[in-house]
Image (spheres, rainbow, N blue to C red):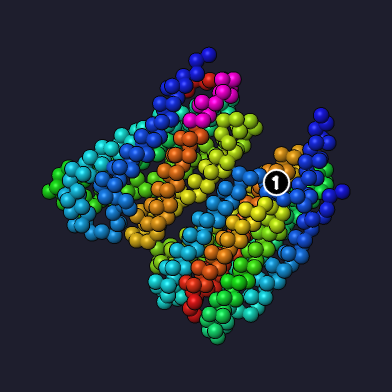
Amino acid sequence: MQTPARDSVTWVWLLLMLITAGSWAVGSHVLLAANHLLAVGAILLFTCIKMHLVIRHFMEVNHAPGWLKLFCSGWLAVLFFSLLGLYR
Amino acid sequence: MQRNITAQLICVHAALAMAVLMGVALLLAGWVPPPSPAMSALETAQMYTGGGNKIRFAALLMMLGATLFWPFAVAISIQMKRIEGPVSQPLAGVQMACATGTVMAIIIPSALWLVCAFRPERSAEVVQALNDLSWMFFIGAVPPALIQVLVVGLCALYRQGAEEVFPRWYGFFCLWTATGFVGGETVGFFHTGPFAWNGIFAFWMAAVFFFGWILVTWWVVMHAIRSPAAETSGAVSL
Amino acid sequence: MNMHATDAEAIAARGTAAPRVPGENSLWLLILGDMVIYAIMFLVFAYSYQQQPDTFAAGQALLNKSFGFINTLLLLTSSWFVAKGVRSIRRQPRLDASHWLLLALVCGGAFVVSKVVEYSLKINAGMVLTSNDFFMYYYMITAFHLIHVLIGMTVLVFMWRTARQPQVSADDVRFLESGATFWHLVDLLWIMIFPLIYLLGRT
């Protein structure tokens, strides 16, 4: 019998929805006016967390070979740091 | 059964000649990247009077390069026919037809460049209009090349047994190339920026994908022509 | 050799923990390649923002964030539906899991409708592709993504048809996984597009 290795999708989905709804409730423009750098960092961080969850769990890269994990993580890192640098 | 390997190889190697001729032509004319759409009519006219013989020669090379795309397209269609089988080969036909569109999208601008450089005393506004027309074709006439590349990718991916002609990754490569072409579709909307005919997406990205696709396809088709499996998957006439 | 036994084994094997690439290896040339193209677009946009911060901030303020949030929720949910569907088929290939894919299609359709409404409102208010550089990027990036959504929905239709078959082969599962991966990519890209175009910047 194979492992139910991939049934975390529902939890992941709930987490994704929560993060999205949460950021809607908080309101980014308020944050951005308060402390610009912190707000940019927070928005980018939560965006990258969401993308990481989709990549690792929905796209099943968690169970993929190392090179694929590396490329995806690298892609996220390039976007996070470049955008942080541009918007700071 | 005659396989006409030599003739097929001549056709596929036309791809390399095409790439070289087109590249040399653009460099000779100083059009890497293309001249800005934001130039005034006077500046455009001066570009042609200043460029003179270089532009004329570049246009000739470009026209020859474009024409060599046709035998290359024939070589591609022959391999597609192996996949599609003896009854009907619609995708191969579509590829060939769209290749004509791609060729004309390069030959027409070449003729226009010859015209622009032909009479230096011509009014600047007329030169600008013809110049606009040339780049709208050269960069903006994306649909034939887009459909051409998509149809090759589709042929490589959706048929069982296509792997013995085109490797799976090549099919996905064609789809990725199609994505890279899309940036050139909106050249009619912008005079400046990344989506103008000299911009990052409309020119640079599309050019890299176009030449990349030619080289990769040359490689893949050449191997398909030479493979022993080609002996058993029957020849079909054009 | 008994095709059903081999197929069942192959399908079951895809549910185990051994490292393997979802769909097929070659698919990832397209997936990662697309990710690279979009990353370049994102960075070009962000750079352009810094060149014209006032124009971009003003344009951004005219956008309605609610559309963005709703679209994110729609795509996240559709991704979940697709993930549920594919896993169900892997675990029990004989069970008809095609309804999951239909639900995903409904979400996709809602996304498209939402986009059409959003574009129509903007266009009627005079904000068009050629208004300024901000709106150029707004339309170009979201429309490029919308094209991917439409392509993804076409793939979902084929996936739905495949899932409805009484017998699902190992090749079919491979196709379903590939299609699912493309749809997750569409979701993934929107997760970045939304804050980039609608939220980040000077207020």
Does residue A74 sit above or below B70 in this rendering?
below
Q: Position of residue C11 (x, y in %)?
A: 78, 43
Question: Which residue is under mark 1?
Answer: C176
- Look at 67% across and 61% down and name the residue there: A54
Q: Position of residue C29 (x, y in %)?
A: 57, 47
Magenta stretch in the rendered image: B222-233
Query: Can you name the residue that lies furthest to the top here?
Result: B1
- Look at 72% across and 41% down and name the residue there: C172
Q: Nearer the viewer, residue B225 or C125?
A: B225
Mark 1 belongs to which amino acid?
A: Leu
Could one spot residue C66 in this view of the protein? no
As for residue B77 lying within the magenta part, the answer is no
Q: Position of residue C69 (x, y in %)?
A: 62, 69
- Look at 77% across and 61% down and name the residue there: A8
Q: Say whether residue A44 is left or right of residue B194.
A: right
As for residue B229 lying within the magenta part, the answer is yes
Query: Can you name the residue that lies furthest to the bottom here?
Result: A34
